Image: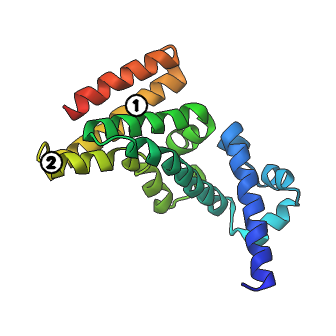
């Protein structure tokens, strides 16, 4: 790698790290080019030397957040041999990530995609974000004969929508009113969804 490529990679990462810090803490509404550049220690004009627009930078953050999420989910899923427990532990890890970082939850599920550009690749990453939490367990249940492939796909979609909805109610309406209630409700929902 040449020195200029290394410099470009380093600068790009500075801006991504700054944007991720803002998104984690304060959400998309505060993630302007100026705020991100200030946090990175550069002028906002410099940001545009490395990113086509703010949408491109935000998409890189979404991809990084998804990678972080998967890194948390993988050990939870791999810690058990039981397919249903894989799903339960994976989804719990997924929920915990978004409870810990509500700004990322807002970016993934509350902000309109149009507000971060008309990019189907952003929507695809977000839509699939819960799959690493569920797919290993569903695949195991299919291989054991407990589910058909069609049933597993239906359950994946049910989990995607119901668990995201549960997290939406918890984050925005405080229902359940506390984390313990959230986890109890989550366990009941997972039990219903995978039985």
Whether residue 26 is visible here, answered yes or no, is no
Residue drawn where x is 73% and y is 72% of the image: 9
Q: Position of residue 53 (x, y in %)?
A: 69, 64
Picture quadrant where residue 166 is located: top left
Task: Name the one closer to the observer, 162 or 86.
Answer: 86
In depth, the one of 180 and 128 nearer the eye is 180
Q: Mark 1 or mark 2: name the one nearer the start of the chain.
A: 2
Q: CA distance from mark 1 to mark 2?
A: 29 Å
Q: Are marks 1 and 2 in contact (CB under 8 Å)?
A: no
Q: Position of residue 39 (x, y in %)?
A: 83, 50
Residue under the point 59% across and 58% down: 59
- Kindly tell me whether residue 41 is visible in this rendering: yes
For the image, the number of numbered tags is 2
Q: Secondary structure at mark 1?
A: helix
Residue 50 spot, x, y in % from top left = 74, 70
Q: Is residue 32 above or below residue 50?
A: above
Residue beneath label 2, please?
144
Q: Is residue 180 left or right of residue 140?
A: right
Q: State which quadrant residue 137 falls in.
A: top left
Mark 2 residue crowding within 10 angstroms, few (<14) / some (14–19) / many (20+) = few
| In this view, 24 is above or below 52 | above
Left/right placement of residue 65 relative to residue 88 reads: right
- Residue holding disc 1: 165
- Residue 79's spot in the image, x, y percent? 40, 42
Task: Determine the secondary structure under disc 2.
Answer: loop
């Amino acid at each position: 790698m040449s020195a200029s490529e290394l410099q470009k990679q380093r600068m790009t990462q500075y801006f991504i790290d700054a944007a991720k810090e803002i998104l984690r803490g304060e959400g998309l509404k505060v993630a302007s080019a100026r705020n991100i550049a200030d946090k990175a220690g550069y002028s906002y004009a410099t940001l545009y030397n490395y990113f086509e627009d703010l949408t491109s930078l935000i998409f890189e953050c979404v991809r990084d957040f998804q990678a972080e999420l998967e890194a948390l989910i993988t050990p939870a899923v791999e810690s058990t041999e039981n397919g249903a427990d894989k799903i339960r532990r994976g989804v719990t890890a997924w929920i915990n990530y978004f409870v810990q970082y509500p700004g990322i939850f807002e970016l993934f599920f509350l902000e309109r995609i149009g507000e971060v550009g008309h990019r189907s690749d952003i929507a695809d990453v977000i839509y699939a974000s819960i799959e690493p939490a569920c797919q290993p367990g569903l695949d195991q249940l299919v291989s054991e004969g407990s589910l058909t492939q069609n049933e597993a796909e239906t359950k994946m979609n049910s989990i995607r929508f119901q668990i995201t909805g549960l997290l939406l109610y918890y984050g925005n309406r405080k229902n359940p009113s506390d984390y313990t209630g959230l986890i109890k409700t989550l366990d009941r929902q997972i039990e219903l969804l995978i039985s």
